[in-house]
Image (tube, rainbow, N blue to C red):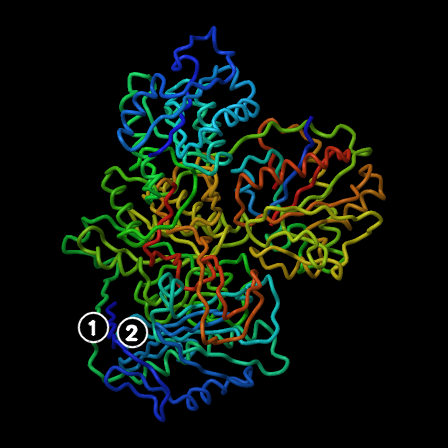
Amino acid sequence: MRLELNTLMIRDIHFADKTIVTDRVLRINREELQKLLLEDPRFRRIDVELAHPGEKCRILQVVDVIEPRAKTSPGDEDFPGVVGGQVPVGRGSTCVLGGTAVVLSDYRERREVGKSTDPSGDIIDMWGPGAYAGIFGKTHNIVLLPTPSDGVNTHAYMAALKIAGLKTASYLARAGKGITPDATEVFELPPLTEIKDGFERLPRVVYIFQILTLQFDPIPGEPVLYGRNVPDMVPALIHPNEVFDGALTSPMPTLHVQTYQIQNHPIIKELYKRHGKDLCFAGVIVTTAPNNMTEIERIANMAASLAKYTVGADGAVLTKIGGGAPELTLAKTAQLCERLGIKTAIATLHMAADISDPKYGATTIFSMPEVDAIVSMGVPFMRLTLPPVERIIGRAGVSAEGAPVNGEMVRATNYIKGTHCQIGGSRLKAIRY
Amino acid sequence: MIRVVHYVNQFFGGIGGEDKADLPPRLVEGPVGPGKAVQAALGERGEVVATVICGDNYFAENIERASGEVRELVLPYKPDLFVAGPAFNAGRYGIACGATCKMAQNELGIIPAITGMYEENPGVDLYRRDVYIIQTTDRAKGMADAVSKMMNFAGKLLGKQSIGRPADEGYFPRGQLVNELVDLTGAERVIDMLLSKLRKEPFESEVERPVYDRVKPASPIKDIRSATIALVTDGGLVPKGNPDRIEMTTATRFGRYDIKNVDTLDPADYEVSHGGYDSTLVRQDPNRLVPVDAMRDLERKGAIGKLHDKFYSTTGLSSIVDIMKKVGQRIAESLKAEGVSGVILTST
Amino acid sequence: MGIPAVQLSAVIAVAEMVGSNRIMLAQKIVNPVGNANLDPDEEKKLRRSMVEKALTALQAEAGEQVVLR
């Protein structure tokens, strides 16, 4: 399968009469976009705002972030099962509006706390230390602020919000079609049966990618894999290009990984880079992280068997999504791989961060001798002081700290979207002093 | 001119060996024994104005009292820096060095303090979280090197320079995790690590495997029909309004809530302070987390003696093991005092 | 003399790792001693049987870890 990602580096965005890219500036017809999104009866009204890097601006209640992308090869469709029909993605060509992002903000007046659907104060700062820490303070952001129609419940609203984001990403990127790109990346990987030309002598490496955690109740109707939520999914082998190209989104509450990061999947990109040199990239196994032991064992067994007996992997890289149960699923899967003779390395955030004692310092919630190669991607609970801002986009939600939303605030980095990345995007590492 | 006070034991203080180990602290002006090496390292920049000498047994057997006595002796000398030892592998001396450094940092006008020990010295485990302890050899033969490292490091503390990583600076890790930006992304590092492993090359995991204490299991309940059973949860169930302000994450507190004469937990009375799981189902029916209704049935049937009048609740999410250990101890002490014979602990 | 305690957890591997002595498998993380798919009566019956089982763990010697699934 061969995919060409053609990136236009956008240097500015603003509202205009027509949605068009000229001279690397994205002009957006706000009314047209709003009209498109209001086709969804679950919304009564949709506000759209723009935020620019360096602007003293804070975006509130951020639920997900999506990079504008649209297919440009004939017969292909964007975000299949959501925006377009059920057509496979990962082949042909795709236009990417680099330097921009669609930001989804929960714009309801009242919301329930303690649910997967509560963004609990997740923010993006466009300037200062918050913008430095996170990746989304560095992009030109198109922020969607939808108001639900009467009687629309939380789940319906959240699913609609995600769909609106994908529609917007496709709508905007279509404006980039036909323009000579600033960069073209080609991702090509043959079927496992056609590995040859010396590649067969390199260690076969598979990536085991958790895409959904069941520690939160999955949101019915939220598109996760090819347009559907997939709580009952069994481990499946997919082509890495499908991950880049709109088959997958990050399920709410998008803990430490947003759809934007999946579209630019750092580990898959890196595996591609080493493909043919250090290793032979043998594909991606997508799995879920269940919420009980029996299911965790079932999923871990199936994933490890798939890696061993179908892919014939020599090595596996594993990551998790979400919190505790996913971490255990991750470790269990790695342990089973090791027992089948597959070498593993995992990358994880320190969730159970014991900052007080190195000896009993539980920075993982598992302790398995076989799982001995762990990369630290940092502790997501370090605090940052964010200076006041002049402009707020979004509605103030329930914030644990209770600080005024435009004032100086001290926030743990897990609240600053884009600071941490469960799939290897950041250069953060936790070091014990 | 940097004013330094130095702490040594009876042996390095030149008073005697084990026979003098019961000696209470005394102060001598100027440097004594290894203090001369400290003075040499200071050179023109400072002066060892006084030396405190104390017997190892005296100190180790009365840590708090001895620390206080040392403090009283040292206060009039208004030091800018407190140096203790190095203690090498001498256990009681190590404890005294750690304790006096901690005292100096906290009670002598917040001055920097430095000591040195061998890795197996019990003083390391006891005090490394509180004070900088430079890694030394196990024998006093390494004195010159140890003192020079300690004084170099002390210079950084005095100059308020940034302190590097434990391995680079030669001190024992104090346990704090700090996020740093490194050259490579997580993606690059995890693939590097896997390739090293595949090539059978050495690699270094960046996260240590946790080790946990084991607690001796308590004896089983002999007569369940007369037993008082308490319900405890780490799922964050609290009365409406969260009166004890139990944190939704990284909790430090617990609550103790009355259920006397309560047949079943009423959803109208409770909320959940826990940010790590979807609490919808528990908020709909709190008995799904704290099974009061079922326990009352068993109580009525006589299957247990009594359901304890209080249930205990805290929040287990990104918890710090040390803090949770203390929370657990306090809950256990309280249950013990209330005459509870067994506990059902529900975890989310 | 300690107080015997049984930990009910849906993710018993964590309880095993941290060294709980008496462990019992719970239903789900989101409702350890419940099952929202059942009728209220059935659910309460389930809960009663679960706490009864938990009581047996409190009456068992726990030389090694006791794990009830």
Residue shown at the point (41%, 45%) measured from the top left: B177
Report the side of A244 relative to B59 (left or right): left
- Type of residue at label 1? Ala
Q: Which residue is mark 1?
A: A183
Q: Is residue A7 left or right of residue A165?
A: left
Q: Quadrant of the N terminus of chain B?
A: top left
Q: Residue furthest top?
A: B19
Q: Considering depth in this image, is A189 or B167 the residue closer to the camera?
A: B167
Whether residue B50 is visible: yes
Residue visible at 75% across and 62% down?
Answer: B268
Give the residue type that dot 2 points to.
Gly
Q: Does C61 sit left or right of B165 as displayed? A: right
Disc 2 from disc 1: Cα separation: 10 Å
Quick one: which residue is furthest to the bottom in this view?
A17
The chain holding disc 2 is A
Sequence-wise, the earlier of marks 2 and 1 is 2
Residue B226 percent location from the top left of the image: 82, 33
* Residue A88 visible, this angle: no
Rendering coords of residue B126 (x, y %): 48, 29
Residue at the far left in the pictured view: A197
Circles 2 and 1, Cβ within 8 Å, touching? The answer is yes
* Residue at mark 1: chain: A
For residue B3, what is the image quadrant? top left
| Rendered image quadrant of residue A101 | bottom left
User: Can you say whether A364 is above or below A420 in the image?
Assistant: above
- The residue pinned by badge 2 equals A98
Image coordinates of residue A283 in percent, x first then y, are 30, 58
> Where on the picture, by quarter, is residue A71?
bottom left
Q: Secondary structure at mark 2?
A: strand
Mark 2: few/some/many CA within 10 Å (<14, 14-19, 20+): many
